[in-house]
Amino acid sequence: MADNIITVSDADFDEQVTASDTPVVVDFWAEWCGPCKMVAPVLEEIADDKAGHLKVAKLNVDDNPRTAQRFQVMSIPTLLLFKDGEPASRIVGARSKNQILSEFDRHLS
Amino acid sequence: METGTTRNVVILGSGPAGLTAAIYTARADLEPLVLEGEPSSTSDQPGGQLMLTTEVENFPGFPGGIMGPQLMMSMREQAERFGAEILTKKATKVDLNARPIGIWTGDPESPEPDVTTRSLIISTGARSLMLGLPNEARLLGYGVSTCATCDGFFFRDKRIAVIGGGDSALEEALFLTKFGQSVTIIHRRKELRASKIMQDRAFKNEKISFMWDSVVTDVLGEDTVTGLRVRDVTSGEERELAIDGLFVAIGHTPSTELFRGQLDTDGAGYLRTTEGSKTEIPGVFACGDVQDHVYRQAITAAGSGCMAAIDAERYLATIE
């Protein structure tokens, strides 16, 4: 995994994500999910490109079902952008880098 | 990607057909470029339809079965091992009559193509159809799913509906019984077109029930799916069915929009091929589900990808 990506869990979600001053994209994923595998390298690129301005976090829904439920994640991959501790934008399903950035950039200015 | 140099072969798509073509053309030192597609949660994505499946039980060589995504990652690795160049991009336009053939991956209005090639292998596959209902799109990710493998987990002890009557529908339904409290298969006819083995398994499964001669006319629910409106096609009567999760497996449509007006298609939109993988344009070959609505198996797609690679190799030898 790229250096700029963190792994979060039910236990440290609030500390790492909702309390973060920097916006955070959380990738809700699981091992069995094919599209999650295809979107993973895209997120690594985004994490590198946006280092310092945007945190990228991965949350395994299999190990952390409470957080998935808390944000009504019922489909993976789901990418949730948190800004000032609140979900600001949501992408359900894998997307290309451009599609992800054009959705999230609107919230990152 | 080197610009300005014309490739020997470009492969569009990266399912079993495209990656087999890549393995063969790479081993033949043709240095193929694979435009594998872009991530999405439909089957129109790198790796193709198998990225959304669970266990593949009938691909020869895997006596214990293999997971669809794992099989595709292995094929990709095998193609790369022989030097195939793989880009996570989609073609936005092609000029099949130009020599060399032109392929655009960025702005299709741009005057110059991004890639040129002496031969082209089309393996863009087919993508799964959705119902096309407004509430289906609105509730995508909130109970409507395009990927049973990915999302079955979220429907533990829930009521699930699967729409369709083919092998894919029954495979999804059987997989979903591992999670759901019940799985209702809604099919527009009175009988299934799925294979005998899948039908036997589905009929035997206690969690699975069937709604025959029925079509879904609406998906219900405010924040998440709570039910479906279903019409009985024989009586015309409508009723509501309370469910929590909806999975649609009503068939596929070939991804051939890119070639419209340049290549011949049959009534259903599939590319026509003759003498193996040849299209009517010399140097342009097609393989896999984009030209096959009869067999549509991973192994037939892989086999036709091999044919296209050999056809392309022979074609290149004739123009040198």
Image (spheres, coloured by chain):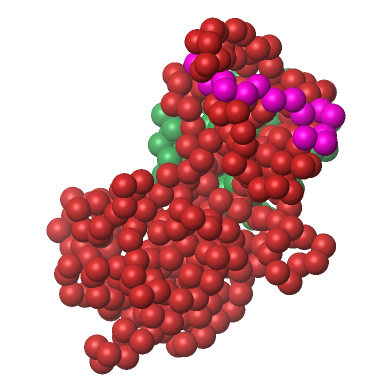
Q: Is residue B206 magenta?
A: yes
For the N terminus of chain A, the image quarter is bottom right
- Residue at screen point 76% across, 67% down: B62
Q: Nearer the viewer, residue A74 or A17?
A: A74
Q: Quadrant of residue A82?
A: top right
Q: Is residue B279 left or right of residue A109?
A: left
Q: Quadrant of residue B73?
A: bottom right
- Residue at screen point 33% across, 61% down: B272
Above or below for B238 versus B140: above
Q: Position of residue B32 (x, y in %)?
A: 42, 76
- Residue at screen point 36% across, 46% down: B268
Q: Position of residue B303 (x, y in %)?
A: 53, 71
Q: Position of residue B195 (x, y in %)?
A: 66, 48
Q: In this rendering, does residue A26 appear at all?
A: no
Q: Nearer the viewer, residue B189 or B9?
A: B189
Above or below for A72 versus A42: above
Which chain has been coloured red in this picture?
B
Q: Nearer the viewer, residue B207 or B176?
A: B207
For the C terminus of chain A, the image quarter is top left
Q: For chain A, what colour was chosen?
A: green
Q: Main secondary structure of the magenta part?
A: strand
Q: How many marks?
A: 0
State which region is magenta: B203-220
Q: In this rendering, does residue B50 appear at all?
A: yes
Q: Is residue A1 left or right of residue B203?
A: left
- Residue at screen point 77% across, 60% down: B65
